[in-house]
Amino acid sequence: MENFKETPEQTATTRFDRAALESRLKESRPFEAGAPSQMADTPIHTQGDQPDCLLQSARMAEHKQTGLDPGLEAYKQPAVEQGLYDRAHGTDMQKFVDVINERPGMEAQLKYADGPQDIKDALDKGQSVIGGVDAYEFYKGQYNLEPNSGGHAVVVTGAEQAPDGSWDFRVNDPNFDTPNMGSKNFLPAWDAANRPMITMQKTGGA
């Protein structure tokens, strides 16, 4: 899983029991699809038994923005070389943005958002959004993870606010091969991680 629970004042290093999640994923059914769909045609790329969720999320976002699949190694190799990734800790989200910005024709920015409207605004502009979430909160009620299980990254493919003020999200979760899954837990899990979001968009250099 990922190390992204960072604020300007402090960085928290987290750990994740991958085996525990793997066993739960095999026993459970995916989320039901929701309604919003700004970026519903984002290709899905899944991770295996290594904590590649942020890398695969960036791969999905670039694939959507450019129409070309860069492959996992386009992100994993520089992350490993720069010391941002290892199997025990996952990927440092804050520093990983620099790796994305080194990709030809790609521009990325990390921010700690004020709220879900920031995600919707980015999606409405045609930007891809990677959301950092607390894994325990994100899978709560579905998989028996322990609190402080670490972070997880997903690509948000849709966000809409209902008339009653509630929010509906669709995500591409690297742990599933089903795209655009509805996620009722996304918002509380995102809040628990201090609302980190990476926006990615194509620039003129592609």
Image (spheres, rainbow, N blue to C red):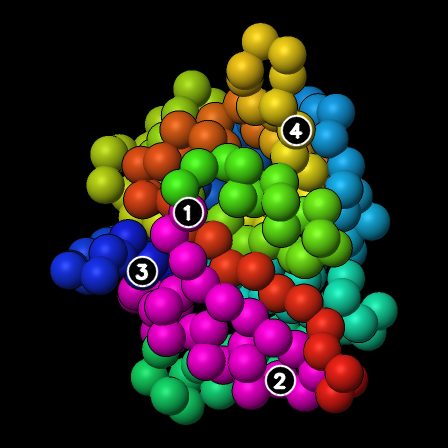
Residue beneath the point at 57% across and 60% down: 199
Q: Name the residue under label 1.
A: 113
Q: How crowded is mark 2: few (under 14 residues within 10 Å), some or many (20 or more)?
A: some
Q: Which of 85 and 170 is in front in this view?
A: 170
Helix, strand or loop at disc 1?
A: loop
Label 1, label 4: how far apart the Cα atoms are: 16 Å
**Label 3's element?**
loop
Image quarter of residue 120: top right
Q: Where is 119 relative to 110, above or below?
A: above
Q: Which callout, 2 or 1, points to the residue nearer the camera? A: 1
What amino acid is labelled 4 in the image? Glu
Element assignment for label 2: loop
Query: In the image shown, does 107 or 133 lie closer to the viewer?
Result: 107
| Extreme-top residue of the structure | 164
User: What's the residue type where badge 2 is placed?
Assistant: Arg
Dot 4 falls on a residue whose secondary structure is: strand
Q: Which residue is identified by label 3?
A: 3
The amino acid marked with disc number 3 is: Asn
